[in-house]
Image (cartoon, grey):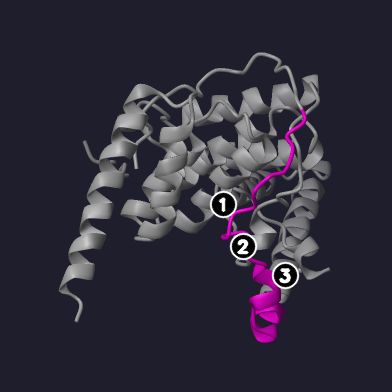
Amino acid sequence: MYPCRLVSGSRAAILVAVMGLVGCNVDGRYVGLRQPKDRVSPGPVRVSSNDSVDLATAEPREVDLVESMASHRERYRQSLEQLHDYYATHGLAAKRSWASLELAGLRSVKMYSYLLDAEVPASSLRAQDSISAADELYEKGLEFMKRGGHGVPVIYRQDRMIEAAAILRQMIQQYPTSDKIDDAAFLCGEIHKEYLPGQEQLAVKWYERAWTWDPNTPHPAKFQAAVVYDYRLHDRARALELYHEVVEDPASTASNSRFATRRISELTSDARQVSATEP
């Protein structure tokens, strides 16, 4: 079995991202709302080497361009909302409907921050509090995923997936201590992995947030990240590292452990062959 793909700034603060899954989910264990968890101190948390400070490495010209774009984008949205309200107040139904449709179109478009550290919240968050309002947003995001065809590819709708990711990110931003932030991060990883093309870098960052925010997350985030690193980013060293962690994790399912074990053997064998042919 091989993972499959479905068809189909400071400055960072002003980069408003409407957050919108690459390999197939093996277990499907994340569909429902989780029960309250017994929390333990997470202890030292390993920060992935992929948690690079993207804002620090970006060229000043890029940051300037992104900042300008985000500012114009936000002013456009606000102006359109004001125009919609004007038409509604003055009884201009036809023009109000035009503005409504244009606003709906904005909500269904995946808008990027373009600087990775502005796209994904900080790794320092911790999933710890049971918050009913956060639970409601999580359920809403999951419902939008289902409406978008999650689990039923034949009715796949990318706009619904983008809206689902926006709701999940909103939940994390509004309730950063919720015990559902790791769940939401995992689902964001799945959306970028399965439903939005060319989103590998974002997918793995969201998966990494899931297990960093809650080292005991029940979701197969490390396995999914390993698959993306392996088959899509072709970072075999990082994939091997994560596959080993999957095998060593007693919470891993038998199918994920078997797959990880096989890939460890195959990747290690390939590395030996390459080494043997080198002068």
Residue 255, located in which quarter of the rendered image? top left
Quick check: 77 above or below 184? Answer: below
The mark closer to the camera, 3 or 1, is 1
Q: Which residues are magenta?
A: 41-65
Q: Secondary structure at mark 2?
A: helix
Disc 3 designates what residue? 72
Q: What is the distance, in whole Å, between disc 3 and disc 1 at their CAs? A: 27 Å
The N terminus sits in image quarter: top left
Disc 1 designates what residue? 205
**Identity, as a three-letter code, of the amino acid under mark 2:** Leu
Question: Outermost residue toward the bottom?
Answer: 61
**Identity, as a three-letter code, of the amino acid under mark 3:** His
Q: What is the distance, in whole Å, between disc 1 and disc 2 at their CAs? A: 9 Å
Q: Is residue 48 left or right of residue 10?
A: left
Q: Of the two numbered discs 3 and 1 on the same chain, state the one appearing first in sequence.
A: 3
At a point 31% along the width and 53% down the height, the residue shown is: 231
**Identity, as a three-letter code, of the amino acid under mark 1:** Lys
Asked if the residues shown at circle 1 and circle 2 are in contact, with their CB atoms under 8 angstroms apart, the answer is: yes
Q: Of the two numbered discs 2 and 3 on the same chain, state the one appearing first in sequence.
A: 3
Disc 2 designates what residue? 116
Quick check: 13 above or below 99? Answer: below
Quick check: 110 above or below 174? Answer: below
Badge 1: residue crowd in 10 Å (few <14, some 14–19, many ≥20): many
Name the foreground residue: 243 vs 191.
243
Q: Secondary structure at mark 3?
A: helix
At a point 61% along the width and 48% down the height, the residue shown is: 19
